[in-house]
Image (spheres, helix red, strand yellow):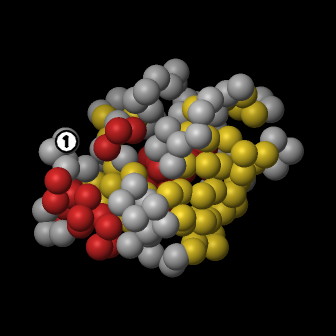
Amino acid sequence: MSQYGPITLVGFSDKPTLYRMILPQRGDVYVKCGADILLNGLKTDLGAEARCPVCRYVTRFHIVKRRVEDLAPKNPMLHVVELGMGAGHVGVECESTHIFDKKDCLTKWLSTYTGKQGLVLSLPEYMGSLNQRLPTKYHEQEHHSITTTQSGSRVLEDRKANHDQL
């Protein structure tokens, strides 16, 4: 079920994926992509595990009060393709949005990736960007296999420019 108390979970998947959230009083919930974990972290505290799509190593972390904490390993990277949705809304293309446990895996994946250009950020950087762009009471839109952003943040603009340098 995609409900968690009064909130609707973003990117809920009824079958196992690379991305698992551990929710208090609910347990394990799978979502479609790495950004879905962070988007849900805007609305509730959670534990998370993300399996690298290249080496399958697991990255573990928590989101507490809209902040990423306890990262293991310490420097995972997020590749995210955002969709322009208008101010106050975030949309991501899940098929192209992944968490990588290390830069080498990201570089290897990008070497064969032919989709839309995405942003490359650390998890805390992307969470900070979401916090800047989305209201405290985040209201999500219907989530289809593509989650739902306005990319006006300076951090994101800087990361777009750096994407090709990897």
Q: How many marks?
A: 1
- Can you say whether 142 is above or below 42 in the image? above
Q: Is residue 136 visible?
A: no
The part of the image, by quadrant, that contains residue 116 is: top left
Dot 1 falls on a residue whose secondary structure is loop
Q: Is residue 18 visible?
A: yes
- Can you say whether 133 is above or below 145 in the image? below
Residue at the location (54% across, 49% down)?
Answer: 19
Residue at the location (44% across, 68% down)?
Answer: 101
Q: Is residue 156 left or right of residue 76?
A: left
Residue 11 percent coordinates (x, y) = 54, 34
Judging depth in this view, the residue of 90 and 74 nearest the camera is: 74
- Can you say whether 28 is above or below 52 in the image? above
The part of the image, by quadrant, that contains residue 68 is: bottom right
Q: Is residue 46 left or right of residue 104?
A: right
Residue 79 percent coordinates (x, y) = 33, 55
Residue 154 percent coordinates (x, y) = 30, 58
Which amino acid type is marked by label 1?
A: Gly
Residue 121 percent coordinates (x, y) = 36, 63
Judging depth in this view, the residue of 127 and 76 nearest the camera is: 76
Q: Is residue 22 left or right of residue 82?
A: right
Residue at the location (38% across, 72% down)?
Answer: 102
Judging depth in this view, the residue of 25 and 128 nearest the camera is: 25
| Residue projecting furthest to the right | 25
Residue at the location (16% across, 59% down)?
Answer: 111
Instruction: Find disc 1 in the rendering and name its residue.
Output: 115
| Residue projecting furthest to the bottom | 74
Q: Is residue 14 left or right of residue 122?
A: right
Judging depth in this view, the residue of 39 and 103 nearest the camera is: 103
Crowd class of label 1 (few under 14; some 14 to 19; many from 20; radius 10 Å): few
In which quadrant of the rendered image does the N terminus lie? top right
